[in-house]
Image (cartoon, helix red, strand yellow):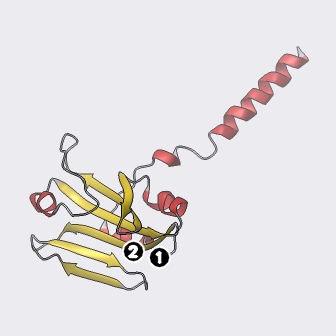
Amino acid sequence: MKRILVCLSFMFILVACSNENGDNSTKEVDITKAFVEENAEVGLTYSEVRERFGTEVLADEVDNAETWLYDSTQYSDFEYNQSLKSIASEEIKSGNLEYQLYINFIEEEAFMYSYFYLGGDGKVWQYQVTPDNKTLNNPVSN
């Protein structure tokens, strides 16, 4: 009987420890411009970016830099051509796509963030954190 209690106690401890960190690997993050302003930081590693922003939807090398894409669609059945080489301005303007966030890495550290969103004037805007940690907020030329 003592062995059974010891085994059950050990199993209980294992189960409790396995849930200690929760489901952060699949957490959904509401990436707004304010969220990017608060969390985008030059020098973050891959794991630190994933911890803050969640898992990217697309990643590849573009112009000798690792580039990650985050986006959010208004409707669950909406699909568009996700690209690391061009922004989806028309999809953002139409309201089908809430935003696109591109994060560029060199040597596994973030060095630039570009967040595209619909401004109050109906234009697509870009909020950018540059490699020297400066921020820019400008309408995108269409």
Q: Sort mark 1 into few (<14), some (14-19) or many (20+) by Cα contacts within 10 Å.
A: many
Q: Sort mark 2 into few (<14), some (14-19) or many (20+) by Cα contacts within 10 Å.
A: many
- The local secondary structure at tag 1 comes to loop
Q: Is residue 56 left or right of residue 85?
A: right
Using the rendered view, name the quadrant where residue 76 is placed. top left
User: Is the residue under label 1 in contact with that under label 2 (CB below 8 Å)?
Assistant: yes
Quadrant (top left/top right/bottom left/bottom right) for the N terminus: top right
Q: Is residue 45 left or right of residue 16?
A: left
Q: Position of residue 140 (x, y in %)?
A: 16, 75
Q: Residue at x 24, y 74 (%)?
A: 126
Examine the rendered structure and indicate whether residue 61 appears above or below residue 75.
below
Q: Looking at the rendered structure, which numbered label has been put on residue 90? A: none
**Residue furthest out toward the front:** 64
Which of the two residues, 138 or 27, is positioned nearer the viewer here?
A: 138
Examine the rendered structure and indicate whether residue 1 appears above or below residue 78.
above
Q: Quote the CA–CA distance across marks 2 and 1.
A: 7 Å
Q: Residue flagged by tag 2: what amino acid is it?
A: Met
- The local secondary structure at tag 2 comes to strand
Q: Looking at the rendered structure, which numbered label has been put on residue 112? A: 2
Name the residue that disc number 1 marks.
42
Q: Residue at x 69, y 40 (%)?
A: 17
Q: Earlier in the sequence, mark 2 or mark 1?
A: 1
Q: Position of residue 58 (x, y in %)?
A: 35, 53
Q: Residue flagged by tag 1: what amino acid is it?
A: Val
Using the rendered view, name the quadrant where residue 60 is placed. bottom left
Q: Residue at x 29, y 83 (%)?
A: 136
Which of the two residues, 69 or 18, is positioned nearer the viewer here?
A: 69
